[in-house]
Structure formats: C-alpha cells, structure tokens
Image (cartoon, grey):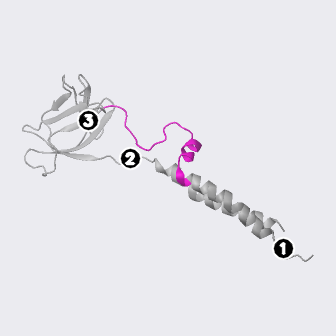
Amino acid sequence: MKKPGIVKGSVLVLAVLGVCLPQPLLAATANSTPVVMDVALGDGGTLLGQVVDPQSTPQAQVPVILRQGEQELAVGKTDANGYFSFSGLRGGVYQVQAADGTGMCRLWAPRTAPPAAQKGVLIVAGKDVVRGDCGSCPRLKCMLKNPWFIAGVVATAVAVPVIIHNSEGGGPTSP
C-alpha cells in the first residue's frame, strides 16, 4: 500500500520542478527585434555618425558600411574622432555597420523629420552586452544562484516526506 504515497510524492516533485526549472531557462532570452532609430538627414542628404566602443571611446579608421536591404550602398572610414558621413541619401530604412556594431536607421529628408529624430547615428562597436545572461556557465550553476529555485528544492525536500508519511497510515492500530 505504499505505491499511492510514492506516486503522490513523485507527482509533487515533478510539479515543483516544473514550476522552478523554466524560470532560469527563459530568463536570459534575447530580444531579436532590431530597434530602428529616426535620424534627420542634413542638407544634400548627408548622414552624420560616430563610432565608439562600449566605454564611449571614439574609434578611428574603422570601416563603416551603409546598406539598404541586401544592397551595399557605400563604404567609408571614421576619422580620428570616430566620425563618418555619407552624402546624397534619400529617406528610407538603412543599416549602418561598423566593426561589431550595427544600427538600423529610418532616415528622413531634410526638414521632414519628426521632432524626436536624432541629428546623427551613434554606433557602439564591440561585443553586445547582455545583462543577466549566464554566459558559458552550466545551467545547473545558474539555477543554483536563483533564490526561487532554491526555495522550490527546499519546499520539495520538506513536502515529499510529509506526504509519504501521511499516506502510509493504514488506519489506527490497536494493541
């Protein structure tokens, strides 16, 4: 008659693990939707921009590529202060790529840009920083850092023996 108690305990353990395990696995998912910046073109359809590293240091002599869709429109380099420019552009959606940084821009013809449009593009070159990502550590190590996971393990360790003990009783015994 111990089988019902073991089954109940197993179901409880699986339920607690099912609640606890998905949280750390889903916590570090990255948003793959690119952010499109509104940028106002200067006179003559000039796009101004700067390339910096993650510490905001300007990057000199970095190749900059301007694309629209799959078509490469222009290639240039940054100056000593990390600035670049492309002229003769029309409004539309463009991709600006420099080193390991990429930006999606909606370019607006001169004097047609919305008030919130930027006057230029800032490209941060270098490896993207993902906060809260576990990096290369094993998943178990990451889960053990999660207080909800630890609380679930402790709750399971307490609840399973209680359930098993309560289900083992076959009724009162007489001496």
- The secondary structure type at the circle numbered 2 is loop
The structure residue drawn at horizontal position 77% and vertical position 69%, both measured from the top left corner, is 167
Q: Mark 1 highlights which residue?
A: 170
Q: Is 140 covered by the magenta stretch?
A: yes
Q: Which residues are magenta?
A: 125-148
- Image location of residue 117, percent across then percent down: 16, 47
Mark 3 neighbour class, 10 Å CA radius: few under 14, some 14 to 19, many 20 or more: many
Q: Is 165 covered by the magenta stretch?
A: no
The structure residue drawn at horizontal position 16% and vertical position 39%, both measured from the top left corner, is 120
Q: Mark 3 highlights which residue?
A: 123
Q: State the residue lying farthest toward the front.
A: 175
- The secondary structure type at the circle numbered 1 is loop
Q: Mark 2 highlights which residue?
A: 32
Query: Marks 3 and 1, how far apart in space?
Result: 72 Å
Mark 1 neighbour class, 10 Å CA radius: few under 14, some 14 to 19, many 20 or more: few
- Image location of residue 37, percent across then percent down: 23, 46
Mark 2 or 3, nearer chain start: 2
Mark 3 or 1, nearer chain start: 3
Query: Marks 2 and 3, how far apart in space?
Result: 18 Å
- Residue 21 visible (yes or no): no
Among the 4 quarters of the image, the one containing residue 53: top left
Mark 2 neighbour class, 10 Å CA radius: few under 14, some 14 to 19, many 20 or more: few
Left or right, residue 28 beside residue 171: left
- The secondary structure type at the circle numbered 3 is strand
The structure residue drawn at horizontal position 57% and vertical position 59%, both measured from the top left corner, is 19
What type is the residue that disc 1 sits on?
Answer: Gly
Query: Marks 1 and 2, how far apart in space?
Result: 57 Å
